[in-house]
Amino acid sequence: MRAWPNEYVERAAVSLGEFELIERCFARQGHPLGRAVALGVGDDCALLQPGPGMQLAVSSDMLVEGRHFLSTVPPEALGHKALAVNLSDLAACGAQPLAFTLALSLPAADVAWVQGLADGLFALADRSGIALVGGDTTAGPLNLCVTVMGEVPAGQALLRSGARPGDELWVSGHLGDARLALEVFRGRLSLPQADFEQARQAMERPTPRLALGLALRGLASSAIDLSDGLLGDLRHILRRSGVGARVERDTLPRSALMARQAPELQATCLLAGGDDYELLFTAPAAAHRAVLAAGRAAGVAVSPVGHITDTPGCRVVDAQGQPVRGALPRAFDHFAAP
Ligand code: ADP
Ligand code: MG
């Protein structure tokens, strides 16, 4: 898009070599685009053709420097994460990835840095069967916005609105390690180097649970991906479904690293960690074994962590079934007072 004349942008655009950068880092001549992409990067629009009887699932997530990542993050990790958080939304809908776009605002055209970003992005894209089909590149503060498109048989998308009283509540993988890394970056926690590396890996390189999302079609009654913390994201399911939930705190899946932390910190990380990108979903109790089998087929552990109730609200209970006392940690909200 042509910007208004502005000295900073004009100068930056010249040194950027906008089209050369796109050509060099993002166009990938001759790379297969997949059956659903009739036309990729290079024209005014990309052209997509979802399969017969399929609905297009579309989602965008933006990563802003200083807000979602630090300037010191390696570009490969940033490329991975920009796509991973978007793929996680497709996973939560049970959609098969098809294509994505990348809108990129960059302070400078550092080709090595942009190539690193593209490498991280394409490594995950190729593993996930999704092609880059377009985008926009402009000078400005560092900011990446990926839009993903996937397909799902009409009427079969997993939604937030289908949870019913009596359903079991499930979570994939384990929770909270990314929050441990954030606490270290904030200077509130210190960890031995190897532990910090593990936590940082969880924060910078989340795995979108695409295979699990597909395996849960027709099985889960509702689903959401965990980006802001379990309690906050669960609330979205509860509101949309008009139900309540009981969460058994001590069943929340945690790594050995998490299990070594102080109980208070564990509760914060597990219940309100943020950046987990695991799936939180509900399924009828009769589907218990089928859900375990879906997890096995998808290669990820799934853990039952509570139940859906008809009393509104969310109750967190301890191993004895007693309500957890004290204020519960709050989920992340960009516009909430700190
Ligand atoms: P327009 O001016 O029509 O918006 P652009 O000149 O911005 O087109 O982009 C030229 C082509 O390059 C388009 O096909 C666009 O989708 C693609 N493109 C631009 N930036 C990116 C990017 N960061 N990643 C992938 N494709 C891009
Ligand atoms: Mg453009």
Image (tube, grey):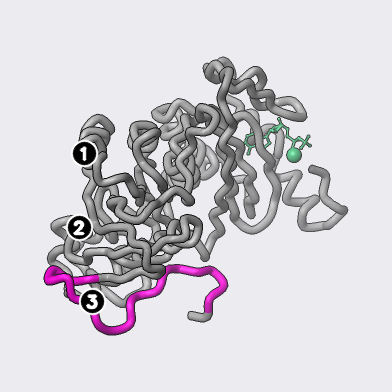
> 50 or 77: which is nearer to us?
50
Magenta region: which residues? 317-336
The residue drawn where x is 42% and y is 34% is: 124
> 180 or 234: which is nearer to us?
234
Q: Residue furthest right?
A: 5
Q: Amino acid at mark 3?
A: Pro
Residue 323's label in the rendered image is 3
Q: Nearer the viewer, mark 2 or mark 1?
A: 1
Q: Position of residue 336 (x, y in %)?
A: 53, 76
Look at the image and say whether residue 324 sits in the magenta stretch: yes
Task: Work out whether mark 2 precedes mark 1 in sequence or the reverse, and give the earlier one.
Answer: 2
Name above or below for residue 181 compared with residue 318.
above
Q: Is mark 3 within 8 Å of ligand 1?
A: no
- Mark 3, Cα crowd under 10 Å, few <14 / some 14-19 / many 20+, is some
- Determine which residue is flagged by label 2: 254
Q: Amino acid at mark 1?
A: Leu
Q: Quadrant of residue 158?
A: top left
Task: Work out whether mark 2 precedes mark 3 in sequence or the reverse, and give the earlier one.
Answer: 2
- Determine which residue is flagged by label 1: 292
SS at circle 3: loop
